[in-house]
């Protein structure tokens, strides 16, 4: 049975002392990109809530609608945005022609890596900014995802010179990487660059976690049986090969631990229906092409090109989410993965290492994560959590030191035992309280954006 959940507004009230200092009254949120609407529409939601409580200001969205993959239904059902949509090509007209006290004074681009990629878009916006009278200037806010995507970043220089740009990322490690990049540019030997004031560009974080409703109640019994990896099927981004390799080997060693029969003469592992517990399944949600080993064809379930409602429904049934980031990938330094927000808004805990928690600092929280020691690979953790027993790992010989067990390292042993003691289940209240904190910080950012803080 699905019990009613208190809304965000029921639980949190933004403290507003005065509206006198609000600098930005009319916000235009725009994007030419056909994706990332879940990111920028969460910003629209934050801004609208803050402005509604302050009884002043408005948000208008310039985008091609309806949004792809039925995200429009999500926006409408959750009430993320309830006003009229405008076509993207109407933005420049509004910026040029509406120059009274109700003119647009804050422009937010949903994916600057795409929205400013051609260079002409930035030049046009900059020309409009220069033409406007001094008391009608607007601030440009760039929502960005990838520090290494530099194709558009030359546009930042002139905006920075005018003190008219801010950066918003979806995770702390990307914000930190942009800060390091900007600090380096501020030390450039080229006076055109060093004089632009890169070190003064504000950089903030807005975590795109939506207030999803009617998430299913979770069972309080039974073994871990559904894990998920979500996102692009690119092996350059996620370590599918090693996950499949480790899972295959573990099934060969002890298929019954996973709820399967020994392979025998079969081409693929088959569920053992004589067991009282459900077999383990690894779901792969995303887009692209991915080759799954034939032995795992009954274990690994690939779902691609789901609509957003379908995705949220399936994700919310998972026991745990694996980031499975590729070792050579960018997700720990320069690029933000959608995995964390996607899982956490569906009340699915994420399997992390201390390093991952440090990178995605907003998820550095035991209420929504399961923390594994880095020496224990993800598949081994899944097996240990499913069995409630990690002796197979702790008693295994340490690499290159066959006479010493992994458990002889007391720090490692303690980390494994602590992980098992806490278990993998997280309560609805833990997720609710975590998300309330995220939304409060998002609201704080929205408040700063409209007050130029």
Image: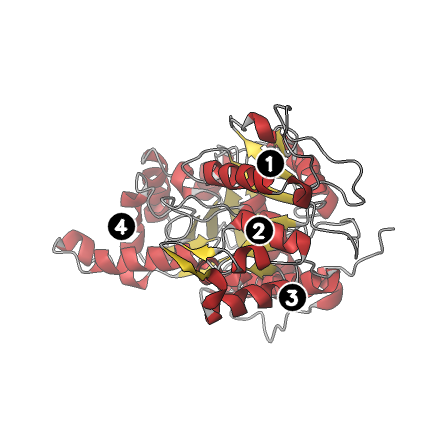
Q: Are marks 1 and 3 in contact (CB under 8 Å)?
A: no
- Foreground: disc 4 or disc 1: 1
Provide the secondary structure element on which disc 2 rests. helix
Number of labels in the image equals 4
- Foreground: disc 4 or disc 2: 2
Residue 25 position within the rendered picture, expressed as x and y whole percent measured from the top left: 54, 57
Where is mark 1, residue-wise? 285
Specify which label sits upstream in the sequence, 4 or 1: 4
Distance, label 4 to label 2, CA atoms, is: 31 Å
Where is mark 2, residue-wise? 341
Residue pictured at 53% horizontal, 39% vertical: 249
- Residue 422 - label: 3
Residue pictured at 55% horizontal, 50% vertical: 380
| Vertical arrangement, residue 237 with respect to residue 160, above or below | above
Where is mark 4, residue-wise? 157
Distance, label 1 to label 3, CA atoms, is: 27 Å
- Foreground: disc 1 or disc 3: 3
Residue pictured at 55% horizontal, 66% vertical: 444
Provide the secondary structure element on which disc 1 rests. strand
Residue 401 position within the rendered picture, expressed as x and y whole percent measured from the top left: 37, 58
Residue pictured at 69% horizontal, 30% vertical: 270
Specify which label sits upstream in the sequence, 1 or 3: 1
- Foreground: disc 3 or disc 4: 3
Distance, label 2 to label 1, CA atoms, is: 14 Å
Provide the secondary structure element on which disc 4 rests. helix
């Amino acid at each position: 049975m699905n019990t009613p959940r208190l809304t965000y507004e029921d639980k949190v009230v933004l403290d507003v002392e005065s509206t006198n200092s609000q600098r930005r009254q009319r916000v235009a949120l725009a994007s030419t990109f056909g994706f990332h609407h879940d990111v920028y529409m969460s910003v629209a939601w934050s801004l609208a809530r803050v402005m509604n409580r302050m009884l002043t200001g408005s948000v208008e969205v310039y985008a091609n609608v309806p949004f792809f993959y039925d995200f429009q239904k999500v926006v409408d059902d959750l009430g993320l945005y309830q006003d009229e949509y405008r076509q993207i090509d109407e933005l420049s007209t509004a910026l040029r022609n509406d120059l009274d006290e109700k003119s647009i004074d804050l422009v937010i681009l949903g994916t600057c890596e795409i929205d400013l990629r051609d260079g002409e878009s930035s030049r046009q916006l900059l020309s409009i900014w220069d033409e406007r009278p001094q008391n009608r200037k607007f601030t440009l806010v760039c929502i960005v995802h990838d520090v290494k995507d530099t194709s558009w970043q030359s546009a930042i220089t002139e905006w920075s010179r005018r003190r008219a740009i801010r950066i918003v990322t979806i995770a702390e490690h990307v914000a930190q990487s942009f800060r390091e990049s900007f600090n380096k540019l501020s030390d450039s030997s080229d006076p055109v660059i060093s004089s632009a004031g890169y070190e003064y560009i504000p950089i903030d974080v807005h975590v795109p976690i939506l207030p999803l409703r009617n998430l299913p109640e979770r069972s309080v019994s039974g073994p871990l049986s559904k894990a998920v990896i979500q996102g692009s099927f690119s092996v350059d981004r996620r370590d599918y090969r090693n996950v499949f390799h480790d899972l295959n080997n573990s099934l060969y060693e002890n298929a019954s631990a996973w709820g399967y029969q020994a392979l025998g003469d079969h081409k693929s592992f088959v569920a053992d229906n004589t067991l009282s517990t459900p077999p383990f399944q690894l779901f792969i949600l995303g887009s692209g092409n991915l080759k799954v080993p034939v032995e795992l064809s009954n274990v690994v379930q690939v779902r691609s090109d789901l609509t957003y409602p379908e995705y949220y429904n399936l994700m919310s049934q998972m026991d745990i989410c694996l980031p499975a980031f590729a070792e050579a990938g960018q997700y720990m330094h320069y690029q933000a993965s959608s995995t964390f927000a996607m899982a956490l808004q569906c009340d699915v805990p994420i399997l992390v290492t201390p390093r991952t928690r440090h990178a995605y600092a907003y998820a550095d929280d035991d209420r929504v994560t399961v923390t594994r020691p880095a020496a224990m690979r993800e598949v081994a953790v899944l097996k240990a959590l499913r069995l409630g027993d990690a002796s197979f790992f702790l008693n295994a010989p340490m690499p290159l030191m066959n006479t010493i067990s992994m458990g002889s390292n007391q720090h490692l042993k303690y980390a494994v035992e602590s992980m098992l003691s806490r278990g993998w289940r997280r309560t609805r209240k833990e997720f609710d309280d975590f998300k309330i904190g995220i939304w409060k910080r998002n609201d704080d950012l929205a408040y700063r954006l409209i007050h130029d803080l």
